[in-house]
Image (cartoon, rainbow, N blue to C red):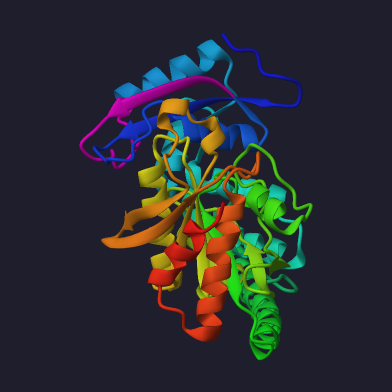
């Protein structure tokens, strides 16, 4: 039995295989999410089903097994790797006699812990309120009492749940209005960059692919980095001087993506992700040492489609090549890789050791020159090939 460290909550992880190709049989990513949120996984359980059980998601027999395992390992909470409906969550908590949460709430919790900027906090608050609004009817039985009467808020006979729903609706409206102002400010900043004819580059990629480390290596910044999921949430923009192009470009580090990223978060982070939509080039950072990188790339592309950035030109940056076995390392620093049927330039780098960064800078110089002089795309590879 694993013993949780001080200040960490022991949790049981549960995953259900419905036949999806991306099912994480080891629940590795859920475990990383839990650790990032300050929890300590003490046990893991997976099972297979053709479809979710309407009442308990996993069925009564498996729910009994989860309850036994949780008590055996001293777990104080159960985390599911899939999203639960409000009814399933309520029924499981009654059956297991333990708090039950899902992947969506876990990601929201991490975002709430990590948001630092005013904009980031607003975005997380909006997503949290939207999630909470779907849980009111079925989860909190104390909201079913009625309130009202002379001098009471909500009017005669208005149920507490109706009052809370209205209050949450008003909070969502206020938060959206504040985000509109932030988005307007960002648009003004982007227009100012456009007037200066700045070439805009945005880093995108799966969380923990090393985007912030690469950002720091390129612009000599001190953005927060850590070997954990969602180490940074707030967009940071710096100027990057490219000697090969004889000019500076704008480089932005954005929030990382993840499998089953809650739609509410995608919507709420629209202002931040707008940097990717308006970019001239996306640096799609990939963790080359992760065997699941094709699935992670597919998840990134799905989010890019959702936010309207799928057609922005991409440059693949396969990072962490220093973590590969010598036999697995690339023979040349630049080639092409198929992304949704399109051959896309790919550069191999190690943001930590600096390997391949000169080639990357040279490719970026070529792209910057293309934007100014309409250089044919074929010359980009030739320019990078000249790099010693």
Q: What range is drawn magenta here? A: 41-60
Residue 339 is covered by the magenta coloring: no
Instruction: Identify which residue is drawn at 30% across, 22% down.
Output: 61
Q: Is residue 359 left or right of residue 194?
A: left
Question: Can you name the residue that lies furthest to the bottom here?
Answer: 195
Q: Which sits in the foreground, 377 or 209? A: 377
Residue 49 higher or lower than 224, as above or below: above
On the question of residue 161 being in view, the answer is: no
Question: Can you name the residue that lies furthest to the top here?
Answer: 1
Residue 202 in the image: x percent, y percent? Answer: 58, 66
Q: Which sits in the foreground, 114 or 201? A: 201
Question: Can you name the residue that lies furthest to the left here?
Answer: 50
Residue 355 in the image: x percent, y percent? Answer: 60, 43
Instruction: Identify which residue is drawn at 49% across, 35% down.
Output: 29
Instruction: Identify which residue is drawn at 71% across, 48% down.
Output: 113
On the question of residue 167 being in view, the answer is: yes
**Picture quadrant of residue 251:** bottom right
**Picture quadrant of residue 332:** top left
- Quarter of the figure that contains the N terminus: top right
Residue 376 higher or lower than 21, as above or below: below
Q: Is residue 68 left or right of residue 366?
A: left
Q: Which sits in the foreground, 138 or 210? A: 210
Residue 253 in the image: x percent, y percent? Answer: 64, 60
Residue 272 in the image: x percent, y percent? Answer: 61, 68
Q: Total of numbered circles in the picture?
A: 0
Residue 30 higher or lower than 212, as above or below: above
């Amino acid at each position: 039995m694993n013993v949780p460290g001080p200040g960490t909550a022991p949790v049981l992880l549960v995953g259900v295989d419905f036949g999806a190709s991306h099912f994480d049989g080891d629940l590795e990513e859920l475990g990383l999410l839990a650790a990032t949120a300050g929890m300590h996984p003490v046990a893991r359980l997976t099972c297979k089903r053709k479809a979710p059980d309407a009442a308990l998601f996993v069925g009564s027999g498996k729910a009994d097994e989860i309850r036994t395992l949780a008590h055996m390992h001293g777990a104080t909470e159960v985390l599911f790797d899939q999203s639960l409906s409000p009814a399933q969550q309520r029924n499981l908590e009654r059956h297991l006699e333990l708090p039950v949460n899902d992947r969506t709430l876990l990601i929201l919790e991490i975002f709430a812990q990590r948001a630092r900027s005013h904009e980031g906090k607003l975005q997380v608050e909006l997503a949290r309120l939207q999630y909470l609004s779907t849980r009111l009817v079925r989860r909190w039985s104390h909201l079913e009492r009625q309130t009202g009467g002379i001098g009471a808020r909500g009017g005669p006979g208005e149920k507490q749940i109706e009052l809370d729903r209205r209050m949450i609706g008003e909070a969502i409206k206020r938060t959206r209005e504040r985000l509109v102002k932030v988005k307007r400010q960002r648009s003004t900043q982007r227009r100012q960059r456009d007037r200066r004819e700045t070439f805009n580059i945005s880093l995108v990629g799966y969380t923990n692919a090393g985007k912030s480390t690469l950002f720091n290596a390129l612009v000599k910044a001190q953005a927060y980095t850590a070997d954990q999921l969602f180490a940074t949430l707030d967009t940071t923009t710096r100027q990057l001087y490219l000697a090969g192009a004889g000019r500076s470009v704008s480089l932005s580090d954005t929030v990382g993506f993840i499998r089953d990223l809650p739609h509410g978060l995608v919507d709420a982070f629209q202002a931040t992700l707008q940097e990717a939509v308006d970019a001239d080039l996306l640096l799609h950072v990939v963790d080359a040492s992760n065997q699941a990188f094709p699935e992670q790339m597919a998840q990134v592309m799905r989010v890019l489609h959702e936010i309207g950035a799928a057609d922005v030109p991409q440059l693949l940056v396969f990072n962490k090549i220093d973590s590969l076995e010598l036999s697995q390392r690339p023979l040349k620093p630049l080639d092409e890789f198929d992304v949704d049927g399109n051959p896309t330039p790919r550069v191999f780098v190690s943001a930590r050791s600096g390997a391949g960064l000169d080639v990357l800078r040279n490719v970026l110089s070529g792209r910057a020159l293309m934007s100014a002089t309409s250089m044919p795309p074929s010359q980009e590879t030739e320019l990078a090939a000249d790099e010693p």
